[in-house]
Image (spheres, rainbow, N blue to C red):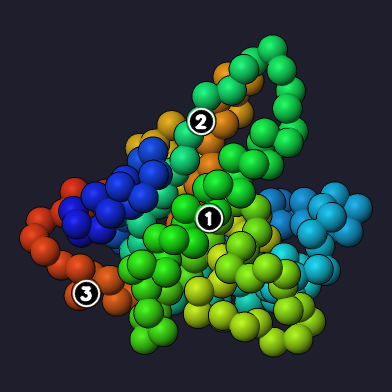
Amino acid sequence: MNHLINKALAAGFTRAVWLDGLRIECEARLREYCNPEGCPQHGSNWVCPPGCGSLDECAQKVRRFDKGILLQSVSEMNPLIKDLDRYKELNRIHNFRLRGFLEAHCNNDMDVLALTSGGCVFCEGCSFPAPCIKPGLRMNSLSAYGIDVGKLCEMAELEYSFRPDKVYYAALVLVNDWVYSFNTGPCPTRKVPL
């Protein structure tokens, strides 16, 4: 998996950690933020409720996996300026970076679940409510799945916080097949405590 981590870093991610033995919780308290009043994306695409499914359905999808790669993009910010457009642009860059990574390293035969901050950027506009055009490469929302990114980063021994001088974006690519496709020797993995 060293090869895959190196590819992620070369793609522009600040940090990449292979995680083995994952047991991810999908928490209702986090999913509560995904509602028509709290998020303009609600009801407009396949990666946000109701398109992504109920929290139970999301949890069932996540439970199929026990390994994956956690990818992080970290950017410096001017703490004196609250620039929402800059935050959005950095999130978009992070998600296009993830898109490139998935396109380069995934194929339709692989069992992959990509989760990220924000939404999917694979299509110009989401086909919702018509069927998803690229369901195997869809980038689902970590928030919509009720995943606590802070806990996830802590498991991976990565810094994650809300600071005025830095912004952290995370993506988790859960996999069942990469171990065999990219096994090129020992990999620095983090065995997550059960």
| Circle 1: element type | helix
Q: Residue furthest left?
A: 185
Q: Which residue type does callout 1 highlight?
A: Phe
Sequence-first tag of 3 and 2: 2
Residue 15 x/y as whole percent: 36, 41
Quarter-wise, where is residue 182 in the image? Answer: bottom left
Sequence-first tag of 2 and 1: 2
Residue 178 x/y as whole percent: 27, 71
Q: Which residue type does callout 3 highlight?
A: Ser
* Circles 3 and 2: CB atoms closer than 8 Å: no
| Circle 2: element type | strand
Quarter-wise, where is residue 180 in the image? Answer: bottom left
Q: Residue 75's mark?
A: 2
Q: Nearer the viewer, mark 2 or mark 1?
A: 1
Residue 12 x/y as whole percent: 39, 44
The residue lying at 82 percent from left, 53 percent from top is: 39
Provide the residue designation for mark 3.
181
129, above or below 191, in the image: below
Provide the residue designation for mark 1.
96
In the image shown, does 117 or 94 lie closer to the viewer? Answer: 94
Other-residue count near label 2 (Cα within 10 Å), few / some / many at <14 / 14–19 / ≥20: few
